[in-house]
């Protein structure tokens, strides 16, 4: 079964942590700097090339490039552009990863218009310098940002109640739609990947009275951003299926949770009978939107990384067998990242980071890489990029054929 061209040049994607939030009492943070990604851009992109990965989620730090008054300094990302062009890696540009300029808070006048102007300028800058197709994520994880920045007080704008969360998510949706239209004024064919957490929320065993609150958060709240972008809710904001475009689902083990009234919720243990298969969660998103899908972030932790990848692949191929148009799986991050709260390394990347006299050395985690290689071979994917990876995009027929050959079934018993 051949001839079904995918959206991306490889089925496996990766990416780099690029948050630029205002964080509690620590002020502005820049995770690309904390992981020394800018310093090691060439090495990081050559790593992906050696692993047969030709697509990477990458960030443009809005707070750092927007100088105010319509002035932008994009020179900060020139080392990234040089490195990705040399390695021939296609970026999915994340234009707002929880961070905004100090004088452009989400509830300030003109926020959406300023964001749209920035999106247009950013799109113009990168499309002139990086080979297409051009892909963007205007605002990352609107739903999670609504909680973390609107209700939990973790990050800017530091709201601490439900009403602020509701206001924040709505204005972020409005800005994202405006950003899509601004980007497409530069490139009419640009693709959008709208990334949101894929979650399940259940009530505590002894609190059946919280079942409706859990359901509302799992269904109504979790789908709000995608619904607005697709035009299913608040059509006055300009959403439409072509605005939603590609649905990016972030999938982690802690995404299946027991409800807590004042949040955050408690992650379910792997043996909890209330866990449902990832395949079923993906099927629910596909049924709701019918848009091309990717798993936009996924990773296990520490020694569990290869087992997690095995489970995600088995569930994903089971979903493909059910007819879901899955265009890729993003192993995120490519290099390790710190826990936002404690600063400890999470050990969730394709590479761990080892501090040697202040230099963060990249150390590939062998078992995780080996598991990636195994699945590349199962899907008839390259394990090392050829001279021009864009000349031979993913044939989704190979992925479908592998799914049919393996006949995998959904399994709620995740590692």
Image (cartoon, rainbow, N blue to C red):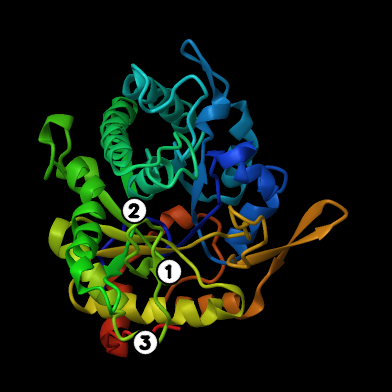
Task: State the CA–CA distance, disc 2 to disc 1.
Answer: 14 Å
- Asked if labels 1 and 2 touch by Cβ distance under 8 angstroms, the answer is no
Mark 1 or mark 3: name the one nearer the start of the chain.
1
Mark 2 or mark 3: name the one nearer the start of the chain.
2
Nearest the viewer among 387 and 91 is 91
Local secondary structure at mark 3 = loop
**Residue 172 percent coordinates (x, y):** 32, 35
Task: State the CA–CA distance, disc 1 to disc 3.
Answer: 14 Å
Mark 2 or mark 1: name the one nearer the start of the chain.
2
Please, is residue 375 above or below residue 106 in the view? below
Nearest the viewer among 37 and 357 is 357
- Asked if labels 3 and 1 touch by Cβ distance under 8 angstroms, the answer is no
Q: Quadrant of residue 278?
A: bottom left
Label 1: how many Cα within 10 Å (few below 14, some 14–19, many 20+): some
Please, is residue 196 above or below residue 380 in the view? above
The quadrant of the image that shows the C terminus is bottom left
**Residue 209 percent coordinates (x, y):** 19, 69
Task: Give the residue displayed 57% in from the left and 43% down from the top.
Answer: 85
Using residue 52 as the reference point, say whether residue 269 is left or right of it: left
Task: State the CA–CA distance, disc 2 to disc 3.
Answer: 23 Å
Nearest the viewer among 339 and 364 is 339
Q: Which residue is mark 1?
A: 254
The quadrant of the image that shows the N terminus is bottom left
Label 2: how many Cα within 10 Å (few below 14, some 14–19, many 20+): many
Q: Which residue is mark 2?
A: 196
Task: Give the residue displayed 53% in from the left and 28% down from the top.
Answer: 63
Q: Quadrant of residue 366?
A: bottom right
What mark, if any, has residue 413 been given in the picture?
Answer: 3
**Residue 372 percent coordinates (x, y):** 52, 75
């Amino acid at each position: 079964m051949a001839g079904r061209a995918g959206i991306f040049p490889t089925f496996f994607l990766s990416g780099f942590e690029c948050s630029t939030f205002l964080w509690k009492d620590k002020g502005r943070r820049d995770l690309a700097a904390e992981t020394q990604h800018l310093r090691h851009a060439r090495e990081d992109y050559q790593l992906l090339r050696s692993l047969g990965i030709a697509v990477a989620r990458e960030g443009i730090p809005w707070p750092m490039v927007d100088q105010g008054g319509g002035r932008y300094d994009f020179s900060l990302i020139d080392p990234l552009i040089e490195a990705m062009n040399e390695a021939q890696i296609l970026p999915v540009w994340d234009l707002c990863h929880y961070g905004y300029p100090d004088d452009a808070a989400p509830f300030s006048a003109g926020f959406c218009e300023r964001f749209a102007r920035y999106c247009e300028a950013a799109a113009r800058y990168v499309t002139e310098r990086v080979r297409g197709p051009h892909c963007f994520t205007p605002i990352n994880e609107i739903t999670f940002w609504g909680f973390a920045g609107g209700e939990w007080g973790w990050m800017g704008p530091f709201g601490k109640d439900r009403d602020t969360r509701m206001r924040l998510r709505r204005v972020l949706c409005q800005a994202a739609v405006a950003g899509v239209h601004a980007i497409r004024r530069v490139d009419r064919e640009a693709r959008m990947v709208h990334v949101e957490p894929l979650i399940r929320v259940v009530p505590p065993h002894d609190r059946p009275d919280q079942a409706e609150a859990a359901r509302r958060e799992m269904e109504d709240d979790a789908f709000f951003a995608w619904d607005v972008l697709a035009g299913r809710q608040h059509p006055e904001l300009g959403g439409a299926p072509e605005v939603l475009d590609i649905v990016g689902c972030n999938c982690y083990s802690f995404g299946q949770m027991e409800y807590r009234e004042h949040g955050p919720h408690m992650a379910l243990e792997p043996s909890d009978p209330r866990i449902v298969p990832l395949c079923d969660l993906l099927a629910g998103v596909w049924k709701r939107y019918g848009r091309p899908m990717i798993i936009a972030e996924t990773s296990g932790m520490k020694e569990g990384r290869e087992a997690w990848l095995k489970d995600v692949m088995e569930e994903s191929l089971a979903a493909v067998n059910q007819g879901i148009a899955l265009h890729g799986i993003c192993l995120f991050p490519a290099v390790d990242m710190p826990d936002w709260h404690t600063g400890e390394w999470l050990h969730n990347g394709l590479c761990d980071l080892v501090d040697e006299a202040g230099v963060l050395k990249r150390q590939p985690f062998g078992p995780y890489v080996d598991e990636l290689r195994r699945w590349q071979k199962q899907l008839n994917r390259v394990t090392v990029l050829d001279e021009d990876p864009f000349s031979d995009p993913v044939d989704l027929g190979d992925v479908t054929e592998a799914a049919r050959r393996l006949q995998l079934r959904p399994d709620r018993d995740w590692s």
